Image: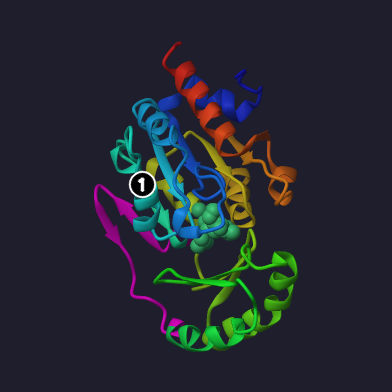
Amino acid sequence: MTIPRHAGLEALLDDPQGAVIGLDYDGTLAPIVADPAAARIHPDAPGVLAELAERVGGIVIVTGRPPGTALALGTSDSGPSLSDVPGLVILGHYGLERWESGRITAPPPSRGLEQVRERLPLIVDGFDGVLVEDKGQAVAVHTRTSPDPEAALEALRGPVAELAMETGLVVEPGRLVLELRPAGVDKGRALSRFLAERKARSVMFVGDDLGDIAAFDAVVAAPIPGVRVCSGSAEVTALAERADIVVDGPAGVVDLLRTISGRVAGR
Ligand SMILES: O=P(O)(O)OC[C@H]1O[C@H](O[C@H]2O[C@H](CO)[C@@H](O)[C@H](O)[C@H]2O)[C@H](O)[C@@H](O)[C@@H]1O
């Protein structure tokens, strides 16, 4: 792959030790599949990230998943797994939980979630094929496996928003999913804090979904050169519209990371 020309990317290539690379998980490192529990990482991603981690200032995965789930789905049968990536940090639940050096730090779950667990099944009852994913700190409603995924998502928006309001949570919309999660966190804040902590001199963030817009905004707001990369899909266009570079899904992301790694290694 030829490296696209962009000032933020050139800053990263000129001074890799000062660069932070942030990545989303679903749709970026892992292809989208019908069952959220089966979203295994692209088989080449952990190996490429492990190589790159030795050459840049920091690699951070910023995801709506709990860090433990990203790690479990990030295992490979044939090569390194995500847990083998040197110095990797995972900011899960949009920054609420952090995994680093084998340890997870997490606040206690929001009390509103108990009510969500009681009331959500009544809301989704009657919607064929709708799936509820309980993530501990948040609960997501997926419509991908329903007969008309878009119509089911639209029909659920109102009742889910009402439930969020009544339980002190917020709704995070995504690819055929509505998530009820605690307020006060987002991928932008999580990324900005990490950049400050690492004293980053440049940043690249790669995402695919609506939840990644906040991280893109944080790249723009950061007082350092930055580049926004979209893992493109026909399903979400809002991120591609804001991106500096668009690649073709997780395979394109792996290809770009491999090319960057080769360039900073002088290959
Ligand atoms: O921030 P992310 O790492 O992108 O996580 C966002 C949500 O991703 C997952 O759902 C999405 O991927 C599923 C597996 O491919 C797919 O079936 C679903 O339709 C997508 O919305 C995950 O299940 C959610 O909990 C995450 O919040």
| The stretch drawn in magenta includes residue 107 | yes
Q: Amino acid at mark 1?
A: Val
Q: Is residue 152 above or below residue 261?
A: below
Q: Is residue 95 above or below residue 71?
A: below
Which residue has dot 1 on it? 89
Which span of residues is magenta-colored?
A: 94-113
Ligand 1 is found in the corner quadrant, namely: bottom right
Nearest the eye: 4 or 225: 4
Q: Work out whether residue 21 can be spotted.
A: yes
- Residue drawn at point x = 73 percent, y = 65 percent: 150
- Residue drawn at point x = 41 percent, y = 16 percent: 265
Quarter of the figure that contains the N terminus: top right
Query: Callout 1: 10 Å neighbours few (<14), some, many (20+)?
Result: many
Residue 187 relative to residue 153: left or right: left
State the image quarter where residue 146 is shown.
bottom right
Q: Work out whether residue 188 can be spotted.
A: no
Q: Is residue 133 above or below residue 257?
A: below
Q: Secondary structure at mark 1?
A: strand
x and y percentages locating residue 133 in the rendered image: 48, 69
Is the shortest distance between ligand 1 and the CB of mark 1 under 8 Å? no
- Residue drawn at point x = 61 percent, y = 38 percent: 229
Quarter of the figure that contains the C terminus: top left
x and y percentages locating residue 218 in the rendered image: 58, 49
- Residue drawn at point x = 50 percent, y = 84 percent: 116
Q: Tell which residue pokes out farthest to the top in this image.
A: 267
x and y percentages locating residue 250 in the rendered image: 56, 38
Colouring style = rainbow
| The stretch drawn in magenta includes residue 28 | no
